[in-house]
Amino acid sequence: MADIKVIFGSSTGSTESAAHKIAAALNADCVNVANATADDFKASTLILGTSTWGVGELQDDWQSGINLLQAADLSNTTLAFFGFGDQESFGDTYLDGMGELYEASASRAAKVVGKTSVEGYNHSASRAVVDGAFCGLALDDVNEADKTDARIDAWVKQISTELA
Ligand SMILES: Cc1cc2nc3c(=O)[nH]c(=O)nc-3n(C[C@H](O)[C@H](O)[C@H](O)COP(=O)(O)O)c2cc1C
C-alpha cells in the first residue's frame, strides 16, 4: 500500500475522531495539523481534514498548517479531503474550510480522489462544492451524527478503489 498520511485540524473532536477512523481503515499515519511539519506533507497520498468555524473559516490549527500545504510539492501526490460542518445553522458556509483546503492544493496535485454527491444534504451554499459535487467527504456531527460512521465507511471504500 502506498504511503498515506491523514492530517487533520479539530477543535471539539469530531474531525479528530473521523481522522483516526479513516487512518485505521487505510493503515495510514494520522497527524494533528497543530503538530505537523513540512515532512508530513511529503506522503504519496495526503488525506486532509478540517472543520469549519467562525463564518466559513478553516479550523484554527490549519492557519499555520495551510502555509505548509501551500509550500508542499504536490506534483506526485494524490489528495483527498474530508470536513465537518453544520449544514443547518451554517447553510451558507457549510464546509467552507474543506473548500479552502481544496483551493489551496488541488490544482497542484497529481490527482484528487474522494469527491462525493451533494444529494441528501440541506445546505444552500458551500465553497466545498466544485463542479456540482463536494470536493471530499461531507460530514455533519451536529445534525446527522448517526450518519457519520456509515459515510466514513463508504468513503474509505470509494477512495481505496480510486487509489488502487
Ligand atoms: C461558533 C461556531 C461557528 C461555526 N461555523 C461554521 C461554519 O461557518 N460552517 C460550517 O459548516 N460549520 C460551522 N460550525 C460547525 C462546526 O464545524 C461543527 O461543530 C464541527 O462538527 C466541529 O468539528 P471539530 O470538533 O472537529 O472542530 C460552527 C460551529 C460553531 C460553534
Image: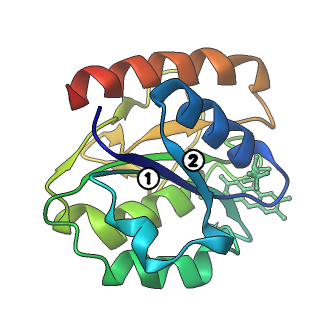
Residue 77 in which image quadrant: bottom left
Q: Earlier in the sequence, mark 2 or mark 1?
A: 2
Q: Amino acid at mark 2?
A: Gly
- The 10 Å Cα crowd at callout 1, few under 14, some 14 to 19, many 20 or more, is many
Which label belongs to residue 61?
Answer: none
- Calculate the distance from the C-alpha at mark 2 to the C-alpha at mark 1: 9 Å
Q: In this rendering, would 152 be left or right of 113? A: right
Disc tally is: 2
| Occupied quadrant, residue 75 | bottom left
- Residue 161 horizontal/vertical position (percent): 26, 20
Above or below: residue 118 compared with residue 7: above
- Which label belongs to residue 128? 1
Labels 2 & 1 near each other (Cβ < 8 A): yes
Residue of label 2:
83
Where is residue 90 shown, x and y percent of the image? 70, 53
Viewer-side label of 2, 1: 2
Q: What residue appears at the point 39 percent right and 17 percent down from the top-left corner?
A: 157
Q: Is mark 2 within 8 Å of ligand 1?
A: yes
Residue type at mark 1 is Ala
The residue sitting at 76% across, 17% down in the picture is 146
Q: Secondary structure at mark 2?
A: strand
Q: Is residue 34 shown left or right of residue 71?
A: right
Pinpoint residue 65: horizontal percent, then vertical percent. 54, 77
